[in-house]
Image (tube, rainbow, N blue to C red):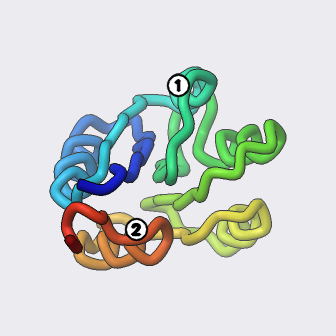
């Protein structure tokens, strides 16, 4: 069995965390969740992940602030921003900060799985 891919999903909505967690876990990923950007930053102090998928609009440390802080700390983890409020200005900022993708809610689950496989590779346990 190959190495597991790890994904940190950050969203302040329980439903989103549950759905994304279930979809990503089914692809062979280890899924870690955080309900805020601040919690995500604390979690990243003790572990490395292959990918972060974060909601843009959250109280306190939002998704853009989280991405900025990750880049400031020189954490090279790939990042996908998710939002229900797609605006060109935030899209440009997020992409300039090095995000892999900027997805609008509701997320097409099949597209998300394809994007994850393209970004961090398919699960070795599913392809063996």
Q: Residue at x 39, y 35 (%)?
A: 12
Quadrant of the image occupied by residue 18: top left
Residue 120 percent location from the top left of the image:
47, 65
Q: Residue at x 29, y 65 (%)?
A: 124
Q: Which mark is residue 103?
A: none
Quadrant of the image occupied by residue 116: bottom left
Numbered disc 1: secondary structure: helix
Residue 120 sits above or below residue 33 on the image:
below
How crowded is the residue under tag 1: few (<14 C-alpha within 10 Å), some, or many (20+)? Answer: some
Q: Residue at x 60, y 69 (%)?
A: 100
Quadrant (top left/top right/bottom left/bottom right) for the N terminus: bottom left
Residue 42 sits above or below residue 16 on the image:
above
Of residue 14 and residue 67, the one placed in the foreground of this image is 67
Q: CA distance from mark 2 to mark 1?
A: 21 Å
Numbered disc 2: secondary structure: helix
Quadrant (top left/top right/bottom left/bottom right) for the C terminus: bottom left
Q: Which residue was labeled with disc 2? A: 116
């Amino acid at each position: 069995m190959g190495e597991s891919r790890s994904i940190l999903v950050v969203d302040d909505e329980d439903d989103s965390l549950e759905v994304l967690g279930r979809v990503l876990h089914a692809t062979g990923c280890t899924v870690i969740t955080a309900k805020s950007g601040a919690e995500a930053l604390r979690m990243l102090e003790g572990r490395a992940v292959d990918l972060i998928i974060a909601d843009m609009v959250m109280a306190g440390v939002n998704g853009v602030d989280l991405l900025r802080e990750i880049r400031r700390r020189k954490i090279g983890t790939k990042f996908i921003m998710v939002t229900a409020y797609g605006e060109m200005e935030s899209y440009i900022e997020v992409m300039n900060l090095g995000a892999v993708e900027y997805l609008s809610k509701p997320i097409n689950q099949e597209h998300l799985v394809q994007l994850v496989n393209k970004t961090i590779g398919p699960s070795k346990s599913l392809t063996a």
